[in-house]
Structures are given as C-alpha cells and as structure tokens.
Amino acid sequence: MTMIKVENLAVSYGHGHNALKVLRDVSFEVAKGETFGLVGESGCGKSTVLGALAGRIKNWSGSIVIDGEGADPKRTKSQLAKQQMVFQDPFGSIHPRHTIGRTLLEPLEIQGMDRRHERIEEVLRDVGLSHNFRYRFPHQLSGGQRQRVAIARALILKPRILLLDEPTSALDVSIQAEILNLLKDLRERENLTYVLVSHDMAVIAHLCDRIAVMHDGIFVEVTTRSSLFRGDVAHPYTRNLLDGSRGYVATKPPREVAVG
C-alpha cells in the first residue's frame, strides 16, 4: 500500500529570471511502514521536500497524495494530524517556558481530543520517559531527553507518518544511537511510515529501506540500504558521499559532477 505519492514536485522562490529553483520535478513513492531517506549536502533541497509534505511550504507545484488523499498547499486539521514533524534542534523546537506536560497538551487541545492526561502519560512511556517528566521544563532535560519529548509531541496525535528532519544531528554520538533505535522500535510497533532527512550516510543506512540521493534540487539516484552497504551505486555524486562517510580523504580536488 502506498502511503505517500509525490509527482513532479517543484518549489521556487522569486519570479521570472530571478526565480531560485529549490526543487525540480521530484517524484517518489513511500510504502506503508517504510522508511524513505533523503540524503545530500546542505542546501540540496532535502528539508524543502519535508516542508512541502508537511504543509509548512505552500508555494509548490506538482502533486502530493497522502494515504490516498490529495493534498493541497492549505491542509485541513485532519490532514495535518496524519503526519507530524520531528525537528533537528530538540531545544529550539520546544517552548522553553512551558512544562513538558503543557507542550504535549497543546496539540491535543488544538485537535479537540479527549483523554488528554492519559494520552500524555501513554506517550511519555512510549518514548521511554516516566510520567514525572510532564512537570519538568526543557532546561531540566538532557539533549536526548528533549528529543524524546519532541518525538512524543509528534506521536501524541497518533499520526500515520513521521517526517524526520535531521533528528539526531544535534546530539552526542552515543545518544544518536539511542534515538535511532527508539525510532526504529516505534515504527515497527505502531506501523508508522517515515521520511527521514539527513546528511549522514550512516544514519540513513541504519534506519532506511530506500534512499534518495539529492543534489541541486533533484534526485540523482534512488537506491536501497543493501546497495549502499555493498557500495553498488550508479551516480558519481552518490559515490562521493559514500567515500566521505568512510573517512575517505581526496588527494586532489573532486571533479564537478554533472547533474541532469
């Protein structure tokens, strides 16, 4: 079953000859329960894809279908609840003056959901935190704990899809593994579908079933985790990313990669 279908997605800023094309004719599908990765250097358009999927970016063209329902730039409450984002910075994405309980309560109030206090305690357990965390403030938590809260906030509306924007890059390496394993367990237990953005090939290979390699606003290659492990990739840019992730040091400046 296809959970996400994107066809000819394009995003530009500005008009006419001065328009900056951020995405150009991006197309892909994500199956129910799959983790689809987007990897590439900063500025290649990865987060813009997530922003269009989430409804945060509205000036896009093309077609987006979520769980069989066509999505317009302006989304309904139910459409927004169906997919939730987890951001890179676990401190900046949580209100510093709200308790964790208040942070988790807010989306429930917006959606008019019942059993609010029970839902808060349930979702804290789901991410490995005790119910006492609801009374704490973000500055009283470690970076890993704050990211667990961010994941809990995304999960509390029972979405079908999580959009993960560099969810571990701001964390220490030892904590990154904990969060990745948590996300993997949650996906399997809740049958969630993920779209994961990262510049880290190791993170992508750990969690993703298929991976789209992005460069300059387009997909240059879509491959699988097993192909990455084998180094069986077709595009020179993908090869450069793999070499970089293995600690490869170039002895001469890399050639420019023609994309198109």
Image: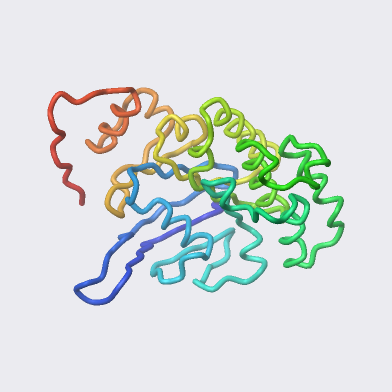
What color scheme is it?
rainbow
- Residue in front for this viewpoint, 46 or 120: 120
State which quadrant residue 249 falls in: top left
Image location of residue 17, percent across then percent down: 19, 73
User: Height in image: 81 above or below 158?
Assistant: below
Query: What residue do we see at 50% from left, 39% from top?
Result: 170
Query: What residue do we see at 80% from left, 37% from top?
Result: 130
- Residue in front for this viewpoint, 115 or 142: 142
User: Is 8 situated left or right of 5 in this image?
Assistant: left
User: Height in image: 132 above or below 178?
Assistant: below
- Residue in front for this viewpoint, 97 or 133: 97
User: Is 100 situated left or right of 29 in this image?
Assistant: right
How many numbered badges does the structure rendering display?
0
Image location of residue 215, percent across then percent down: 29, 47
- Residue in front for this viewpoint, 186 or 168: 168
Query: What residue do we see at 54% from left, 73% from top?
Result: 74
Image location of residue 102, percent across then percent down: 76, 56
Query: What residue do we see at 65% from left, 53% from top?
Result: 96
User: Height in image: 20 above or below 153?
Assistant: below
Image location of residue 136, percent across then percent down: 76, 45
Residue at the limit of the structure toward the bottom, as seen here: 16
User: Height in image: 26 above or below 196?
Assistant: below
State which quadrant residue 10 falls in: bottom left
